Amino acid sequence: MKDLNMKEICLNLLVSRGVELKDISEIVYDLQKKYVPDLDLKTCDDAIHRVLDKREVQNAILTGIELDVLAEKKLLSEPLQTLIDNDNPLYGIDEILVLSICNVYGTIGLTNFGYVDKMKPGIIGRLDEMGKKTDKCHTFLDDIIGAIAAAAASKIAHNAITK
Amino acid sequence: MKDLNMKEICLNLLVSRGVELKDISEIVYDLQKKYVPDLDLKTCDDAIHRVLDKREVQNAILTGIELDVLAEKKLLSEPLQTLIDNDNPLYGIDEILVLSICNVYGTIGLTNFGYVDKMKPGIIGRLDEMGKKTDKCHTFLDDIIGAIAAAAASKIAHNAITK
Amino acid sequence: MKDLNMKEICLNLLVSRGVELKDISEIVYDLQKKYVPDLDLKTCDDAIHRVLDKREVQNAILTGIELDVLAEKKLLSEPLQTLIDNDNPLYGIDEILVLSICNVYGTIGLTNFGYVDKMKPGIIGRLDEMGKKTDKCHTFLDDIIGAIAAAAASKIAHNAITK
Amino acid sequence: MKDLNMKEICLNLLVSRGVELKDISEIVYDLQKKYVPDLDLKTCDDAIHRVLDKREVQNAILTGIELDVLAEKKLLSEPLQTLIDNDNPLYGIDEILVLSICNVYGTIGLTNFGYVDKMKPGIIGRLDEMGKKTDKCHTFLDDIIGAIAAAAASKIAHNAITK
């Protein structure tokens, strides 16, 4: 583990939880294709990499996924164990945690995140379903993916406007 | 003016800019009917009133609409005049200003706002159109309406869950 | 545990980590006595109780203290274990988590928190010292206490101004 | 005006309101010298320039100073005119506006801002005094300066830690 940098650790962690970079790219593409007609998936991948370079993003990923995994293993104390394991809608800490991801490229990230969080496109909807129907816990993971996609979409929007 | 309280001043200001309480209620209803099956417009009206009781909401309304009106009258200095009058997508201060409204009932407000800001339902879409096609300036107003609706929807969600 | 409400659980959890209500009251008192000449500790206690009634505050307390305790027991995965156990200044998730506490009574809470976080008065300084010199981990706890004190001070400020 | 870029416009605007770059540098220096022993004013100047390069910072400066100037000229509508002209402590929009400045280099900015906002070092204290005792209005300006200094201090802190 020592030889890996933080970004690689985060990418590996996402893969271990069932999320590939291309799953996030598809969401970014859908968010921005309307505004950037010549958008391609390579540009979306690059934007996601820039988001994952940021320290605050890496720390939010590490912390959120740790809490999901601990909840899955029933290793948290009550009443936190039940709040996270059931994805209680009044818990709210999952959304707070990912604000730091949404905001890395300014406030457009927040509106993108709100939209994605409501519509649950692609992998986000699948993670949400699995979290509800299996013994997997994705309370933090779906918000983390939505926030990474939202921030990457904001990065692309900024670049498109200032070109 | 002295005899009016701040909430009445804000409601009158919204009417003077073409927004009735029922326009906002319709958005709140559409946001929450999926989650609260027995929702009615009266409950939406009440939730909007609770949001408008808050000092930080009133101050955001007064400030945002003032900037819209000054931009319409070409009374702002450049380059601010052009940034606001053209609703420049990189301006971003409109979204910052209304965060204080979205957050009065917790973080659910943010995701509701993001969704509304993207979908532009009802009066929000009409204000946005008018801002682009006429000499009206609605740079702040459409975000203010979206944020009030989002906060009111969050209030209803909290009440429904804790019932 | 079932018979306890969430606020009692949080108060007990704070006591188990070495923090009594009066420790927080002293910080609130010091923050506000300059602005509210007739302030007493009873008023500070009451304001802290109002802050602890809020769901988002309770959830932040439960989550932050759980992470501190897990770090103390060396039960987190690397590199998160080291980041939290060493209170790494670039970790930042502790400050993000408590923003939800600071903001329950509006933006004054944020400036109060910033001040307390820098000055580390009373129990906050003692927790910070212990976290550095013993095998205790207080990475989240000192920020949680600072945020509760900041929010309670904001509540008192609002009441004083609108009286 | 056309030939000036946005950063120059902002720097000129600050000078026209009585604030030189070196006034802000002194605050940044005082905030960080404790943590970065070999800090010099040149490094502080550079960090402030990086903050002023950011679009959201420029937009917040333009908007806040415009509102101060309009209040000074009594050109705002009531009750907003009185709220801003008297720097009413419950107004709060000044602090909301500058959150976008504080956060450009992560959450450390917020605690730095809270500290500066309470202690009012150097030019910030002088602007606050002038705002209260003369017919100048500095409701937004003192928060803008505090937020620029806080963000620049955060930039220096990040660089020092990751060196």
Image (tube, coloured by chain):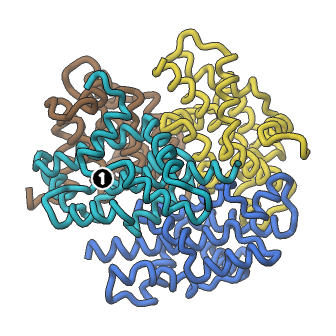
Chain colours: A yellow, B brown, C blue, D cyan
x%, y% of residue B1? 8, 55
The amino acid sitting under disc 1 is Leu
| Circle 1 chain | D
Per the image, the residue denoted by label 1 is D141
Which image quadrant: the C terminus of chain C? bottom left
User: Furthest-top residue in view?
Assistant: A38
Which image quadrant: the N terminus of chain C? bottom right
Neighbour tally class for label 1: few under 14, some 14-19, many 20 plus, Cα within 10 Å: many
x%, y% of residue C6? 63, 72
Q: In this view, does A45 lie above or below C105?
A: above
Q: Quadrant of residue D57?
A: top left
Q: In which quarter of the image is residue A152?
A: top right
x%, y% of residue A160? 51, 19
Q: In this view, does D9 lie above or below D152?
A: above
Query: Is residue B49 in view?
Result: no
Camera-nearest residue between C57 and D120? D120
Residue depicted at 18% across the width and 30% down the height:
B72
Camera-nearest residue between D84 and A75? D84
Relative side of A142 to D13, left or right: right
Callout 1: SS = helix
Query: Is residue C10 in view?
Result: yes
Relative side of C97 to A53, left or right: left
Instruction: Report the label total.
Output: 1
x%, y% of residue D121? 39, 66
Residue depicted at 49% across the width and 69% down the height:
C115
Q: In this view, does B59 lie above or below C163?
A: above
Residue depicted at 80% across the width and 62% down the height:
A76
Q: In this view, does A9 lie above or below C162?
A: above
Relative side of D92 to A44, left or right: left
